Every structure is written in structure tokens, then in C-alpha cells.
Amino acid sequence: MLTFFSDSHHAHAPQYEFFRGERVPCFETPARAEYVKARLSERGHVLQTPDADSRVVLAKVHSARYLAFLEHAWRDWVQLEAGNEARQPFPSVWPVRTLRSDVEPLNFTARLGLYSMDNGSPLSAGTWYAAKAGADAAASAAALLTAGERAVFCCSRPPGHHAGPDFMGGYCFLNNAAVAAQALRDGGAARVAVLDVDYHHGNGTQSIFYDRADVLFVSLHGDPMTEYPFYLGHADETGMGEGAGFNLNLPLPAGCTAARWFEALEAACLRIAAFKAHALVVSLGLDTFAGDPISKFALQPDDFIRLGERLGKLGLSTVFVLEGGYAAAELGTNAVNVIEGFEGC
Ligand code: Q9C
Ligand code: ZN
């Protein structure tokens, strides 16, 4: 399968995050994309450098003030104090209910909190550069589909599906799946489906398209009653306004079997088929793998082949965008299994 990969992902390399109250090394590492790239090459898949500029599409899925903040966040952080070059910024205050989010404060940490859903999305010097390259890959993939290609895989990081219209979260900064879907719409696809199979609910993607009937969002994920992102992803979220009926959440209990996961996948695929989508975007999180260090589903490597086969049977032009998956050494095999299942179906 044609694949987009850019070395720019290395520019996003924060050193630590918070986990159970402790500072720990980041789970979302540059090694992840390198393992996937290595396995893709080993299996003879063609790697290309993204050639599209996603800026116009990004402005349709994210707010102008969020994009401006993110692009200049590291510069602003370092300008506060020279020593900040070697420190990671984290938010510590958020505009929750009754507080104002319409006014952008001048204070850097206050702005970081305004544009963050959690303290789990560390920035580094090249975060914008890396995230922009991932969005460019998504736009490039959409352009190839518009030109007639059946399927393209974006091997990019950081991931994107937790990033909403105007916030980062869950290691995500720019919503690559939303960029792909919007670019497909702009390329003439009247109806685009986004299927999110990451362990975590794709809250950002859901929010971006929640009031739209032209982009169907379907997600299977750990039940937000116990799993991140906690505050979105319930079954009763079905869309609003024109988008009513065009959002489908299939939350599953943490610890459930692969058999139960595949039942939900079948329901997801039936909804996508009924929508009569012209193109499909798959938010391909691989943190459903049994060996994932932060997630609680039980998929085995062969189950990823089965996932690819089922997606291939939908018969749609498809962009795959890499999302989560933190068992880094197994990520290449699991990603390529999906791709090869898709191609071999
Ligand atoms: N810092 C994706 O899979 N964080 N994001 C847990 C606390 C939430 C996962 C650790 C997990 C986010 C794209
Ligand atoms: Zn995830």
C-alpha cells in the first residue's frame, strides 16, 4: 500500500509525561513511527514524502486562534525564560464550567490551559513542525484518493484524534483524520465516513463533525465511564442539528474479549455501509493490542489482519491514519497486518 512518511516526526520528542502522579518517559515516542516504517519497508510497501500543504484544510477543522497558538507556542514558552528551552511546558489551570474561554489571556500557562483538555500532551521544540507534517500527510493521502488511488496509509505521529476544534489532548495536536476527511470532501466526495478503532474514543474528531451530515463518525472504544477521555464517547451521543444521526459510539467494557470487539466492528461497518460513503478514513489506533501498556483490550497480531480484511470488504477508497498504540516494538507488525489484510481481502 502507498504510504506517507516524513522524518519530521522526530521533531516532536518530549521527554516525559505524568502517569499516576509520577513523571514517566513518554509513551508516545519517535520509535513508534520508526518501527512502523521499518516493517513497511521490510514488506515492500512504498514510502513517499507528503507533498500537500494542509494549511487551508486545517483552518476548516481547527480555530484560527488555536492554530496560531500552537504554531508559536514553543517560541512563546522560550521567550518567557531562556532556561525553558530545556523544560517542558504543562498546563495547570483550565477554563472549566462558568469560567470564560472566549478571552485569550496573555499569560502563557493560562493560554496553554485554554487550548488543552489535559496535562498529558507535552510539547517540545518541534511539535508544530512534526504535527504539521502529519496533517500534510493526511491531506496528501486525500489528494491521492481524489485522483483515484484505492488506499493510502499515513505513518505519522504525533497522533490526532483527541485534538478538537480548539484544543490539544491525549498526545494529539492536529486532527489528522479530520484533515483527511475534510480534504476528501473538498475533493468532491459527497459523504465521508470516519471509523475510529483506537482504544480511546476520538473525542476531537467527533466534536469537529458533530453537527454535520456529510461526515459520519463511528467509534469503538473503551467505555468512557472508566477510560480516557472520560468526558465524551457515550452511546447516547448521536449528533446534533443537521448532524443528528451521523455519530455512532460503540463503547465497550475495558477488558472485553476480541470476539466482543469484532461484534462491535461489525455494527460499525454496517452503519458505514448504510451511509453509502464515497470514502473512508480510518483512525488506526493499535492500542487495542493485548500487549499495550496503557490500554485494556485483547487483540492479537492476527486480529489486525482480520480487521484489515473487514475494512477491505467495505469496498471503499480508504485513508488510514496512525493514531495510538504504545507497544512500540509490535506496532510495525500490527499496522502492516491491517494494511495487508485490507489488500488481501
Ligand atoms: N498522561 C492516544 O491513544 N493519557 N492517546 C494517559 C496520562 C491518556 C492516548 C497517561 C491516553 C491518551 C492517541
Ligand atoms: Zn488511544
Image (cartoon, rainbow, N blue to C red):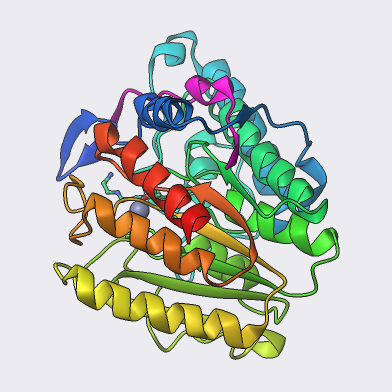
The residue that appears at 60% across and 45% down in the rendered structure is: 105
Residue 332 lies, with reference to residue 219, above or below; the image says above
Residue 137 lies, with reference to residue 66, above or below; the image says above
**Res 197 visible:** no
Which image quarter: residue 137?
A: top right
Q: Is residue 22 magenta?
A: no
The residue that appears at 34% across and 50% down in the rendered structure is: 286
Q: Nearer the viewer, residue 94 or 312?
A: 312
Residue 51 lies, with reference to residue 160, above or below; the image says above
In this picture, which residue range is highlighted in magenta? 1-17
Q: Is residue 16 magenta?
A: yes
The residue that appears at 45% across and 49% down in the rendered structure is: 340
Q: Position of residue 155 (x, y in %)?
A: 52, 37
Residue 187 lies, with reference to residue 335, above or below; the image says below
**Res 237 visible:** yes
**Callout count:** 0
Q: Is residue 164 left or right of residue 325?
A: right
Quadrant in which the N terminus is drawn: top right
Q: Nearer the viewer, residue 314 or 123?
A: 314
The residue that appears at 32% across and 39% down in the rendered structure is: 333
Q: Nearer the viewer, residue 169 or 276?
A: 276
Q: Position of residue 58 (x, y in %)?
A: 73, 48
Q: Position of residue 218 (x, y in %)?
A: 50, 74
Q: Position of residue 57 (x, y in %)?
A: 77, 50
Q: Is residue 342 left or right of residue 212?
A: left
Which image quarter: residue 315?
A: bottom right
Q: Nearer the viewer, residue 256 or 227?
A: 256
Q: Residue furthest front?
A: 344
